[in-house]
Image (cartoon, rainbow, N blue to C red):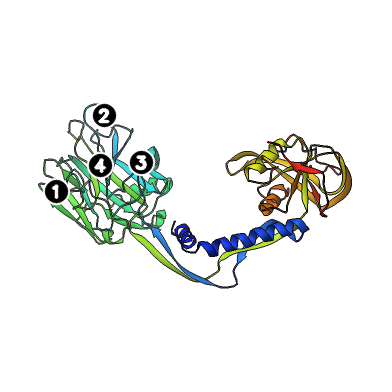
Amino acid sequence: MYYYKSILEYCAENPEKVMGVVDKARKKTIKMGQNAEGQIPVQMKYVPEDYKVSYLISEKLGIPVEGGVPTAITLWAPLSDDEHEILVDYWGAHRLTDDFSGPDLADGSMHYLALTTNTSGSELWSIENGKASSLGNASNMVPGGDWTNSVINLGNGGAIAEWPEGFWEGSIGFVGVWNRVLSPSELGNAPYLDAKTQNQPTLQDFGISNMLVKMTFDDQSDLHGNTLELFGDAEISGGNLILDGDGDYAQISGEFAKTINVGQELTIVLSIATELDQDYKTAAPFGMGIPEATPEDEPRIERKVSKVTNADLLKKPVATRTRPRPYAYILPRDAKKAVNLLKMHNITVEVLQKDISIVVEGYLLKDIQRKKVHNHPEAAIVTVEDSTVFKEMNFPEGTFIVRTGQVMGRIISHMLEPETPENIIIWNTMDNLLPQPGPDSIVPIYKVHKPINLPIALIDD
């Protein structure tokens, strides 16, 4: 945006200089066409400039999510009554909620669940018997917001200040947070990281790295420097965190909050046991976010700035194939669609006033392909032989003549040379005129190389 703005500002401040350059280019274009001078680049590539450059790259670390960037996330609140869905909330500038349908978790048994989040969205998983099964995904829930001072709340309404003070009741046996997305096989192995498992494998045994939190509730700290604080009558018993009354919750804080990034990809694994007769409508067993944040806060979006020095600047155009510029192009009198396209580009087209015989150059048609190009569903791509043919041909009255000695002369050549990337053939204006490819087939766009007097007149619109 700033690049275009600077160009417009320069043009506004230097109108005479800019128009002088334009006028000079127009006069040169007309002269080259009138004299049939020079070469036309029909295929190009970009190579480095002769000098090196240095520049800054600014990367936004927070990713917008439907008008707001999440500052907090809450996971897995089994609902009461007949709605035992798993609920995932993201909080940011406004509330973003996605419901995932899953198994009934309110049965008093321990269940392992996981949430993975990346730039494509979020996916919720159930982990049973060493296998992770997807419970659903949401493309509008992606990493973002300010996680760098996060805490994890277990058992209360969540991690941000203005949530309803609902409290969840049940047992939590394991909390794990990774700063990357775990694969399904890694998720399946995650329960074995619970310290209560006999002959516990190491993280490396399962290829699970980048772990930020590993809270197993045998004590109130973990091996990553995170600590657990208990509130109300919350207690640790038998390797589980027990929350069985209003005001019971726990909070994990520590090193993970210093290392997690803005916009971080995440995996969160949780094991919980809940009872069917509890009221979980306003509570969640897990919430992560900034304690002082509110749902109305506009999250902080950080940017990462990197400096690149002594780099190539790939913007120098070099022609990889050229063709001689003609005095004029000839199109059959049935090429009305092609002529209409030319006229849309302010190109002057004329017509023969009588039959005439002219020596022209033609391209031998080697192949025709139909394929999608950008937003063009079925472009016609022709391939021509490297060598061309010269022959004398009879052209009837009404044949179209497009002389290159005009202001739009460069555009004319770009549109009428069959090897350029934006010619009239590609845009299907010649479909009914193209012959079958073969050794004697000629593309029906002919070139007149020497300036000659032609019996022509402007098209009568």
The crowding category of the residue bearing disc 4, from other C-alpha atoms within 10 Å (few below 14, some 14 to 19, many at least 20), is many
Which residue type carries mark 1? Answer: Glu
Quarter of the image for residue 166 reads top left
Quote the CA–CA distance across marks 1 and 3: 28 Å
Quarter of the picture holding the C terminus? top right
Quote the CA–CA distance across marks 3 and 2: 17 Å
Q: Which of marks 2 and 4 is nearer the N terminus?
A: 2
Residue 393 appears in the picture as rendered: yes
- Count of labels shown? 4
Q: Earlier in the sequence, mark 3 or mark 2?
A: 2
Question: Would you say the residues marked 3 and 4 are in contact, meaning their CB atoms lie under 8 Å apart?
Answer: no
Which residue type carries mark 3? Answer: Leu
- For the point 65% across and 47% down, the residue is 422
Q: Mark 3 points at which residue?
A: 124
Q: Earlier in the sequence, mark 3 or mark 4?
A: 3
Q: In this rendering, would 436 be left or right of 191?
A: right
Quote the CA–CA distance across marks 3 and 4: 15 Å
Q: In this rendering, would 259 be left or right of 27?
A: left
- For the point 32% across and 32% down, the residue is 103
User: What is the secondary structure assignment of the residue under circle 2?
Assistant: loop
Q: Earlier in the sequence, mark 4 or mark 1?
A: 1
Q: Mark 4 points at which residue?
A: 272
